[in-house]
């Protein structure tokens, strides 16, 4: 598709990510409800949401707070959970690294799983051209507003959401919808498999350390597989390839 202007690319990015915001609404509601339920003030809950802008890390840290975990454990766990954003940034950098800091810094804060999933496919196809930045901004800004509005709604509702709504069931479904289309290489498949198996095996570890173990195991597995593939490709004999 040919974009006539940056504004058109921005709008198209917002339209593309809009259906995915429905998957984060239950997650945001639960996050807001949980924050109020554990005794946080609305201002604290909103401040934490703005600071983190990572639903998974925020939920885990709140659980660790309830369990009386050490602050260092909370910090390390949040960092490990968000290590995937380093890989996201590295993948998007060739297309956005030319931007001035007044653009690149806000974009790094607004990076999300949904924006990356959409933009990585668009960037790889080359169809965006010089409109990569406004398209990404459209997806990122829309997702940011959707997430924060959902959390604020949860904070406002407090504990008034009935259990019969089963909002928790929508959380893994939204992550699966993002995960499965991105399992396009042995590295991503290996990371997902190892991380999933470790999460199940380590589910009973104290202080929610099972999630930390699973995250580290998945990241290490993906990086190792990718390095092995790269080294194998470099050591292949060109004559054997020709034959």
Image (cartoon, rainbow, N blue to C red):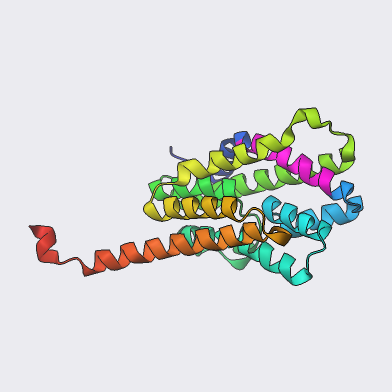
Q: Determine the residue located farthest toward the top in the rendered image.
A: 164
Q: Which residues are magenta?
A: 20-34
Q: Is residue 164 left or right of residue 96?
A: right
The quarter of the image holding the N terminus is top left
Q: Please state the total of marks drawn on the protein image.
A: 0
Q: Is residue 27 magenta?
A: yes
Residue 173 visible in the displayed image: yes
On the image, the x and y values in percent for residue 74 come to 73, 65
Above or below, comparing residue 221 to residue 1 in the picture: below
Residue located farthest toward the bottom when viewing the structure as drawn: 72
160 shown above or below 43 = above
Q: Residue furthest left?
A: 243
Q: Is residue 128 visible?
A: no
The percent coordinates of residue 42 (x first, y second) are 90, 50
Q: Quadrant of residue 240?
A: bottom left
In-image side of 145 versus 221 (left or right): right
Q: Nearer the viewer, residue 228 or 8?
A: 228
Q: Nearer the viewer, residue 185 or 107?
A: 185
Residue in view at x 68 percent, y 35 percent:
169
Q: Main secondary structure of the magenta part?
A: helix
Judged left or right of residue 182, residue 177 is right
At 85% from the left and 53% from the top, the residue drawn is 45
Magenta span contains residue 23: yes
- Viewer-proximal residue among 203 and 172: 203
Instruction: Name the residue located 25 percent from the left edge and 68 percent from the top edge.
Output: 234
């Amino acid at each position: 598709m040919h974009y006539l202007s940056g504004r058109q690319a921005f709008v198209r990015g917002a339209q593309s990510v809009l259906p995915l915001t429905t998957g984060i609404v239950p997650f945001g509601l639960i996050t807001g409800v949980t924050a109020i339920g554990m005794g946080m003030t609305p201002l604290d809950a909103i401040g934490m949401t703005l600071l983190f802008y990572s639903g998974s890390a925020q939920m885990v840290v709140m659980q660790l707070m309830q369990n009386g975990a050490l602050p260092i454990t909370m910090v390390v766990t949040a960092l490990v959970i968000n290590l995937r954003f380093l890989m996201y940034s590295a993948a998007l950098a060739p297309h956005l690294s030319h931007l001035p800091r007044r653009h690149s810094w806000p974009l790094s804060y607004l990076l999300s799983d949904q924006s990356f999933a959409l933009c990585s496919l668009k960037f790889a196809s080359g169809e965006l051209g010089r409109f990569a930045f406004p398209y990404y901004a459209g997806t990122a800004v829309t997702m940011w507003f959707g997430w924060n509005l959902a959390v604020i709604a949860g904070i406002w509702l407090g504990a008034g959401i009935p259990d019969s709504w089963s909002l928790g069931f929508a959380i893994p479904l939204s992550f699966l919808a993002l995960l499965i289309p991105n399992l396009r290489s042995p590295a991503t498949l290996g990371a997902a498999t190892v991380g999933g198996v470790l999460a199940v095996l380590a589910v009973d570890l104290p202080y929610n350390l099972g999630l930390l173990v699973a995250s580290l195991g998945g990241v290490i597995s993906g990086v190792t597989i990718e390095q092995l593939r790269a080294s194998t490709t470099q050591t292949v004999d060109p004559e054997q390839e020709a034959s």
